[in-house]
Image (tube, rainbow, N blue to C red):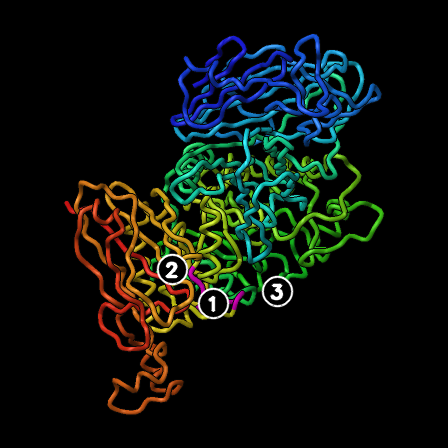
Amino acid sequence: MITIHERRFVLSTKENTLLLRVNEADKLVCDHYGRRIEESDLEACAIPAGMPAGRQVIYDETKSKKISLGMIAAEYGTPYKGDYLSPMLDLTSDKGRVYDFVFVEAKIRPMEPMIGYPTPRGASEELVVLTRDEKMGAELELHYVVYEDADVIGKFAVLRNTGEEDFTIRKIMSSQFCLQDAGYTIHGNYGNWAGEFQRNETLIGHYRYEFGSDTGSSGDQHNPFFMIKRTHSTLTTGSVYGFNLIYSGSHRAIVEMDSFGMIRVQQGISPQGFEKVLHPNEEFMTPMAVLTYTHNGLNGICDHFHRFVNDHVIPENFAYKPRPIAFNNWEGTYMKFNEGKLKSLAKTAAEIGCELFVLDDGWFGHRDDETSSLGDWNLYKKKLPHGIEGIAAYVHKLGMKFGLWFEPEAISPDSDLAREHPDWAIQDGVHDPSLGRYQQILDLTKPEVRDFIVEAVAQHLRTGVIDFVKWDYNRTFSDLPQSGSFCHDYILGLYDVVGRLTKEFPDVLFENCASGGGRNDLGMFSYFPQGWVSDDTDAFERAKMQMEMAFGYPPSVMSNHVSAKTNHQMLRKTSFGTKFDVAAIGVLGYEMNLNDADPIDIKEFKNQIEFYKANRETLQFGTYRLLDVFENGRQIVEMADKDRALVSYMNYLQNPHPGNETLPLTGLDPEAVYTYHVRPEVHSFKTFGSLINQVTPIHIKEEGALVNMLSRRRGLDAEGLHGEATGSTLNSGALQIGRQWAGTGYDESTRIMLDFGARIYVFERKK
């Protein structure tokens, strides 16, 4: 809800209030953003100007002898008039570099789709605050959008040239927001290929902190999502602000504390390499930034942003629609496949219960390795003599959907497309272009390139046999042409391409991928309902990444696969049970050579998928709560709805002297009674090494043929846990789950977790 009280503007969500005010100097300031306030108390919340401190520059003595732009909680900042913090806007023209925008008017109007950008749905109105610099011929509109049920505020800006001369935008951010006191920590993430969403925490001091991506994409280096939290905040308590950007390109976040303890937070397009000339009567719109506040700790941010993404960002026809269980052939075959091998894998995938078969890289051109054929989206008949339609028909006959991998933004130097259109690849025209993964990127700022990509993908989708597209993007920008806004224009071109395709094929499920999680952002999720989290499928690494990603994004967008026991990225060996217990929090898939799996493993896969199907909606769309973190020796995640809770527990490093453990829960109805049990799992005999001889009548060699033969078909049942209790007792953290293995004996309550082992515990409301 938005209301206007003369020169005060109140934007209220379910739990929070953003209070804006035009001060005596005609500048828009933020008096409050946090828990809801009464509209009768607006005067009490006004930040007093106070006396100017030190060497502050007085902005305009005719309006106020107290106000310095360097000491107000400004909603926008420009340089050279006394504001020496990082500016939201930096403009220049032949007239000069001083742009001074003052309040003109504010109005509430119906919310309309943003031009060129994805726009979250569901907001009926927006507040538009118009400011102007009459002398420089420029207007700045500040837009505020309320997503009430999700407790999220959207902010973006529109800059307009109302004069008779050009001016240049050197920097323009989507949002500026000020906190009034110190004692906060930045909780963000960093990463790279196979190591996305790594936690990074920095206590905010009297410095300027800048982070983001200048790679051309939103990036695994720093995702646009981050939080600013009270330093003492926990998972469930404390004031936390969450920030994100609905944008898929180079971006920047700036957090700066001034000498007096005020913190300024900005987010928007990266200013590195960005210059945009605005001609008379032209305007420039930024992408939307979104922010939220909670006093319920880090899990409160999860709750707000998960509701926002599921309710307002994901394409409406896929919102809360259960995602299929996929089998992807990549780690099972890489590019070394033929039609017979694919059919054999598809048959086994269908037998274990998969619902979608995805054919990955290598089906087009003459692509046998990474060095060729990107851009030539014609069939590789040597591998698929009966075509895409042939393998798709076989998959459909097995009762599964069929999916296909594309990397449409890329071009191989060794391709017909590169030979026909050498100017279509991004290049500066001076230097020899640098390659990444033996490829270049197509220039999506060119309409003819966008048309080619749309048609190249659409010609396959129009056959009607493709139900799913994995859209990959495997390298970052280099060799940019001389264009001040090239990176930004590329992203607008990308949105044009994916917007046209998803509009023509609304029922095709698209999965976002960028060498893993290099472009998992709210912009891409506006078109593609799910994203591949990381190329690293190691269970422990994925557990960390999924947890960190989940602060800003719901499990419904996280595509997670059970891969080979010996992980291809880490060479760490982990049980299939552990891999499933991690991958199940989100969108489940499998990626390995199923035909190499032992009979005991095939049985395990069937049981896993049966379990997942029975609990899919809770695991994809339930309320996410992080209950414990690896710093305490274990990571515990709860997914809950009104009838059940599923708890994924992952061990860190095994302890030789473990104590008794309880399981904390928070999401159960205290008045209800719940039955509970641990998901059944089986330990390999190989786990026990030579200890197996303590219970066998004959001597068995630890790595011998007999133990290998037995392990392929049978195992030892893991611990048992079952019973019933009230929700109030379970929520109190009183449930005992048994002591871990300590090398001194084994019974049915002993939990053999090992390093990085996992379990899922199930709690169901008793009818």
Residue 755 visible in the current orientation: yes
- 690, above or below 500, in the image: below
- Does the CB distance between marks 2 and 3 fall below 8 Å? no
Going 76% across and 12% down the picture, which residue do you hit?
135
Front-lying residue, 709 or 763 = 763
Residue extending farthest left: 767
- Figure disc tally: 3
Q: Is residue 376 left or right of residue 536?
A: right
Which residue does the numbered mark 3 point to in the structure image?
A: 368
Name the amino acid type tagged 2: Met
First reached walking from the N terminus: tag 1 or tag 3: 1
Q: In this view, does 711 lie to the left or right of 727?
A: right
Q: Residues within 10 Å of mark 2 (few under 14, many from 20)?
A: many
Marks 1/3: CA–CA distance: 15 Å
Which range of residues does the magenta coloring cover?
A: 562-570
Give the structural element (helix, strand or loop) at label 3: loop
Marks 2/3: CA–CA distance: 38 Å
Which residue does the numbered mark 1 point to in the structure image?
A: 341
Front-lying residue, 121 or 334 = 121
Name the amino acid type tagged 3: Asp
Q: Where is residue 111 in the image (x, y as percent from the top left)?
A: 50, 20
Give the structural element (helix, strand or loop) at label 1: helix
Name the amino acid type tagged 1: Lys
- The quarter of the picture where residue 343 lies is bottom left
Q: Which mark is on residue 650?
A: 2
